[in-house]
Image (cartoon, rainbow, N blue to C red):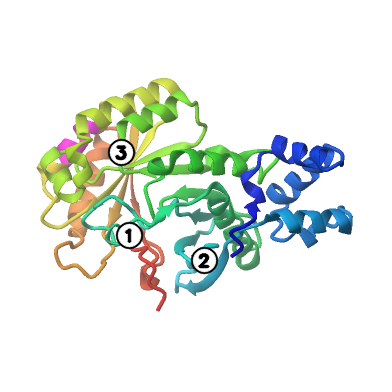
Amino acid sequence: MDTTKKDIRALSKEELRDFFVENGDKAFRGNQIYEWLWIKSAHTFNEMTNLSLTTRKMLEANFVINHVKVDKMQKSIDGTIKNAIKLHDDLIVESVLIPTKKRTTACVSSQVGCSLDCNFCATARLKRMRNLNADEIYDQVVEINKQSELYHNHKLSNIVFMGMGEPLLNYKNVLNAIDKITNDEGLGMSAKRITLSTVGIPKMIKKMANDEVKFNLAVSLHSAIDEIRSKLMPINDKNNLADLLASLQYWYQKTKRKITFEYVVFKGYNDTQNDINALVAYCKKVPSKVNLITYNNIGDEEFQSADGKIIQQYVKTLEANNIIAKVRKSRGDDIDAACGQLANKMD
């Protein structure tokens, strides 16, 4: 890694245009570079074939492109692909391609490790090393799109920020990445096909609403009872259910988009009728739907998936109250690629 040169993707289009003017060239050259970087996803300056050799050498002398690399890849029996993504500083994050009959979804990471302490999540047991840059998030999407085209013969259809890290603790870079992914001067994907998943940080949810983002919001809830949620997710001590609800109501008021609650049903934690009733009451306070998730083992006997009958009772009760509920089937759990299992294990 060359630390003496600036990563060219840290420059805006305007800064690229200014660079060429300052070096005696035309401003439009910056537009050409920007297109190569963000529409064509170029990894090297030599790929930029509509530039003269002299221009490419000048770029090489001044900049680097710190693109990510798929270091290792694992395929599940269900077609899910887990990638160990090596960053320019040799740190590793994981991202996942999740295929179904109708679509392919990229599950991308936003941080190296995680600073939150959700007790049931493998990623939480890794210390947070750093935030990912916008280009590193963008690169994950590019690499998974290649896999979608290679193995499934069509482009990536959806993106979920459900990989390693808490996206709202890397707010600026995540939103910048989403802009590059959705912009016509980038990958041109629809924001409606992107879902950001958060543990629920009220002030940041309100900020997203004020920033008029166009993507969807999912919240890891797991209990609508403060005492239980705090046992599962210590962040609830500082961002309790009442504060979270107020921010979600504000989100809906500003965006008119339903929230998706992600809800893992654990044996001995949230598997009673009282838990079900609390969730129903919470959902009635803000337009929402529920994805019920069976727990994916991370080698800790403290947490086990609840009985299937309890999960079906959740569905039955939610639907009886006109709340959309789906049981989300885990994908890639045989390669530790399922929800909550990403912890840089590539055996």
Crowd band around label 3 with a 10 angstrom C-alpha radius: few (<14), some (14–19), many (20+): many
Q: Which one is closest to the eye, mark 2 or mark 1?
A: 2
Let me know if residue 280 is in the magenta part.
yes
Q: On screen, 8 above or below 227? A: below
Residue 100 on image: x %, y %: 50, 59
Which residue matches tag 1? 123
Indicate whether residue 227 is drawn in magenta. no
Question: Who's the residue at 14% across and 39% down the image?
Answer: 225
Q: Secondary structure at mark 2?
A: strand
What stretch of residues is rendered in magenta? 276-282
**Mark 2 sits on what residue?**
86
Residue beneath label 3, please? 200
Dot 1 surroundings within 10 Å: few (below 14), some, or many (20 or more)? many
Do labels 2 and 1 touch, CB within 8 Å? no
Quadrant where the C terminus sits is bottom left
Mark 1: amino acid = Thr
In x, y percent, where is residue 27? Answer: 82, 37
Q: How far apart are the alpha carbons under marks 2 and 1? A: 17 Å
Secondary element type, mark 1: helix
Percent coordinates x, y for residue 216 in the rendering: 46, 37
